[in-house]
Image: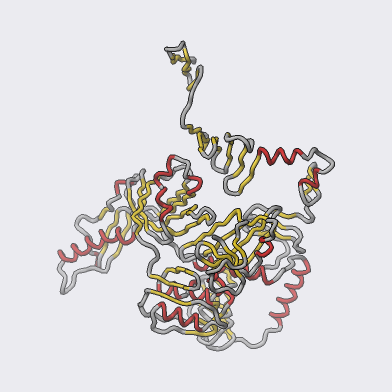
Amino acid sequence: MIRLFEKNATTFTSNGINVLNNLIKAISKEILNGLYSAEFEAIYDTTGKWKEIIEGRIIHADGQPFRIYKTRKGMTSLYVYTRHVFWDLVYNEVRDIRPTNKGAQAALEDVLGAANYLHPFTAFSDISTPATQYFINRNVTDCIMGNDSIISKWNGELKLDGWLISILSQRGLDSGVTISYRKNILDVEVTEDYDALVTRIRPKGKDGLELPEVYVDSPYVSSYVFPRIKEVEFDIGIDEETTEEEAITQLRAAAASYFIDSKCDLPVTNIKVDMLNLENTEEYRNFKYLVKVELGDTVTCRHLDLGIDHKSRIISIEKDLLLGRTSKVEIGDFKERMSGSITKISDTQKVLAQTVERNNSDLSAAILNATTLLTNALGGYVLKRNGEILIMDTDDPATAQKIWRWNINGLGYSSSGINGNFPIAITNDGRINASFVTTGELSANIVKTGILQSANGSSWINLADGTFSLGAGRVTNNDIRYTGTSIEQALNGKADMSTVEDINQYYKFDDVIGLTIGDNNSNLKINITNQQMNFKDGEATVAYINGQIMYIKSVQVLDSMVVGNHKVEKYDANITLVRWIG
């Protein structure tokens, strides 16, 4: 049951404002040490429930509270975007706190307790290893999971449950699930990176110590076309307490352990499984047990082409909250993604806080502003030290807050001290980071963006979901001109209105399942997605075309068929002939 609650709700035992039974889409997605969000689509119901779904209120779904941060009105329904209430802490700030020689739970409690204003969040951690971290002028979420955060310092993994924030040594369990896959498999996206693969090492100890046999092979060395060799140095050698024979034995054992610890003999693999698309295919039997796994769980991946078994973790899970089931699973080598999540939220915060007009007058104003700032600067301190130049608001890097830092890796500005963050930067890998860019003419090969919007906000194109609005609903392109607020208005008086009814009768469009063609009253339909064409009888897929190949469960040929240069044909009721036809 999915329910709507007021903005200040902290308990969710009642039905709240409304039970949202007008939803036609409810999808949540959680990334390990990353964003936890949910998106909903509510139809414009006659009771007006959709009008209650407004920014700031909380939707409680799958046992978790999600804060609404954006809504978008479509033609027939309201699109609702939410994040777990944990991200409320993006707007709260820690002024100056230094958890010293403490475990992760105590550090988390210190940060939560130092927040600028009260909140309902509590802390838990099973990591008792002491450490020290300094936080100054940072939002609470960034302190917990950003760069130089509690998670990175104490090497933990984030788990959210309502108002409880847990930082665990590791999420999930070894689920006991084994999946078998090939690199080229229908309806499963498998990415493999062999670039860093090593299957034969030449271990090297102190003072040039090497093994008599020189090399140590991975158990998987024969699984690849040729061995991949690398020298690996170990802090092992001959000394007063270690003979040459003992040192060689230790070096050999260390080399064997290197493959186990580093997994360098396995390709870096990422597997994305769409459970809903997969369930009607033959390959589903190899993946069906993934519906039981949870985020952070470990599964055994069996590579059928290489004959290799290896352990990987569930790093992302997407759930269909209306069906109450897992819809997508991502399996791979865990990579920390915290900073990306916070960057996205900070960008959203800026968009919600202000509307910025990017036109020629803005460029002139920006040039004037920069000229005024640079020509009227007073004070400041310049320090040249080994390898870099610092420009600061005090004469001591330890106390400076506003600081420009320039070294071999780039140039950046921080308003929170020598160790950043640096939201404005030019780095030596060719990247420029800035929260606001004013320009006259932009020339680029590729522009990656979310929303393109006119200066007055009347027209926009959302490149993420493909929706757009052009002025007052006008699309003009030579022979095409449409003006109005609906297709029905455009056709009124110019076409038979039954045309619209015919479209609804035989064609259905859906963001998830694609285009479906067929009479509403018939079980026989054709479904077209970005991956394949399906021929369906009711809910069953009886045949499909994928990769220029047609797959069909059974075929009945009445008279004849041609296969290459041969013809198979019925001769009489008892005899079938195969003959060459050239």
Q: Nearer the viewer, residue 14 or 139?
A: 14
Q: Is there any visible trace of residue 195 in the rendered image?
A: no
Whole-percent x, y for residue 211 in the image: 21, 59
Q: Is residue 295 left or right of residue 241?
A: right
The reply, left or right, for residue 318 in relation to residue 211 is right
Q: Is residue 328 above or below residue 519?
A: below
Residue 123 screen position, x and y as percent = 45, 76
Tell me the quarter of the picture where residue 401 sits. bottom right
How many circles with numbers are drawn on the protein? 0
- Please tell me which residue is depicted at 61% across the width and 72% down the height of the picture: 7
| Residue found 38% across the figure and 83% down from its top | 101
Between 245 and 302, the residue placed more toward the observer is 302
Above or below: residue 167 compared with residue 75? below
In this orientation, which residue lies closer to the viewer: 383 or 32? 32
Residue sitting at 25 percent across and 65 percent down? 205
Residue at x 81% of width, y 39% of height: 495
- Can residue 187 be seen at all in this image of the molecule? yes
Looking at the picture, how far across and down is residue 49, in whole percent? 66, 61
Q: Quadrant of residue 80?
A: bottom right
Q: Is residue 220 above or below residue 559?
A: below
